[in-house]
Structure formats: C-alpha cells, structure tokens
C-alpha cells in the first residue's frame, strides 16, 4: 500500500531510520499505521527502567509530533483526505509503534 511505503520513507528521511515492517489499515474515517522494529538496541536497553520507558516514549512521540505537517501532507496526497487528529504510541516492550490518523471523511467515500 502506498501509505505504508510513504510513511516508511518519511521515517528514513526525517527520523534517520525506518521500521522493519509497516502496515496500514483503513477503517471508516481512520488510517491505522502499524510499524514494527522501530527501536534501536540502545533504546531497548534504556527502556528496562520505568524512567527510561517514560523518557523514550516522550522523546519518540515528540519526534512524530515535530514531523506532523509532513505526515499530514503524506496522508492528504495518498488518501485525498485531511487529518482531523493524530494519535501515536510506542511499545517499549515490542518496539511497535501505532499511528492513528482520523480523517475528515471516510476514505472510501467519494466527495
């Protein structure tokens, strides 16, 4: 899917490192992106403590928020929808990140 490819490319260009896999699912007015393998070995080590987990999550979420305008542009180009909201979280246990884009209209309906 084009959305997965574009998000992976954004990760490589903006964050300096891409995920191992990326999958996108479209449901009603949601685009759900699942990224596997986003943490480095050092980040896994950092996440062995509660403080490290909190710092890592905050840092990684701030990085995504700082690139929000680029992500919005990607979603608009691929799905022809604007973003109402963006939600993201990362698992420090599995190294998986979820990004949920709420769209201004269902992706499968014509304007």
Image: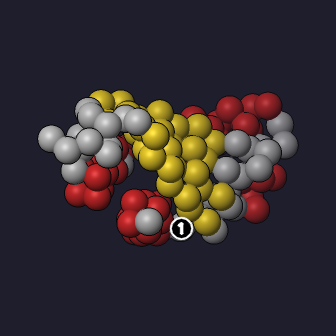
**57 left or right of 104?**
right
**Is residue 70 at all visible to an observer of this figure?**
no
Judge the density around disc 1: few (<14), some (14-19), many (≥20) Cα neighbours within 10 Å: some
Q: Nearer the viewer, residue 111 or 32?
A: 111
**6 left or right of 97?**
left
Q: How is the image coloured?
A: secondary structure
Question: Where is 58 relative to 47, above or below?
Answer: above
Q: Secondary structure at mark 1?
A: loop
Toward the front, the furthest residue is 109
Toward the right, the furthest residue is 48
Q: Nearer the viewer, residue 96 or 64?
A: 96
Q: Residue at x 46, y 40 (%)?
A: 27
Q: Residue at x 41, y 36 (%)?
A: 28
Question: Where is 68 relative to 44, above or below?
Answer: above
Residue 106's spot in the image, x, y percent? Answer: 32, 37
Q: Residue at x 37, y 35 (%)?
A: 29
Q: Which residue is mark 1?
A: 17
**Is residue 31 at all visible to an observer of this figure?**
yes
Number of callouts in the render?
A: 1
Q: Nearer the viewer, residue 31 or 71?
A: 31
Toward the left, the furthest residue is 111
Residue 54's image quarter? Answer: top right
Residue 86's image quarter? Answer: top left
Instruction: Please identify the quadrant where the N terminus is shown.
Output: bottom left
Question: Where is 58 relative to 12, above or below?
Answer: above
Q: Residue at x 83, y 37 (%)?
A: 49
Residue 34's spot in the image, x, y percent? Answer: 58, 51
Instruction: Please identify the quadrant where the C terminus is shown.
Output: top left
Residue 9's spot in the image, x, y percent? Answer: 42, 69
Residue 82's spot in the image, x, y percent? Answer: 23, 40
């Amino acid at each position: 899917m084009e959305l997965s490819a574009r998000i992976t490319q954004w990760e490589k260009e903006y964050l300096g490192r891409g995920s191992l896999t990326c999958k996108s699912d479209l449901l009603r007015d949601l685009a759900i992106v699942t990224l596997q393998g986003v943490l480095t070995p050092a980040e896994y080590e950092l996440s062995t403590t509660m403080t490290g987990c909190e710092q890592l999550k905050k840092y990684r979420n701030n990085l995504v928020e700082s690139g929000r305008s680029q992500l919005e542009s990607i979603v608009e180009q691929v799905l022809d929808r604007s973003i109402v909201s963006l939600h993201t979280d990362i698992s420090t246990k599995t190294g998986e990140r979820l990004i949920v884009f709420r769209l201004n209209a269902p992706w499968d309906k014509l304007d």
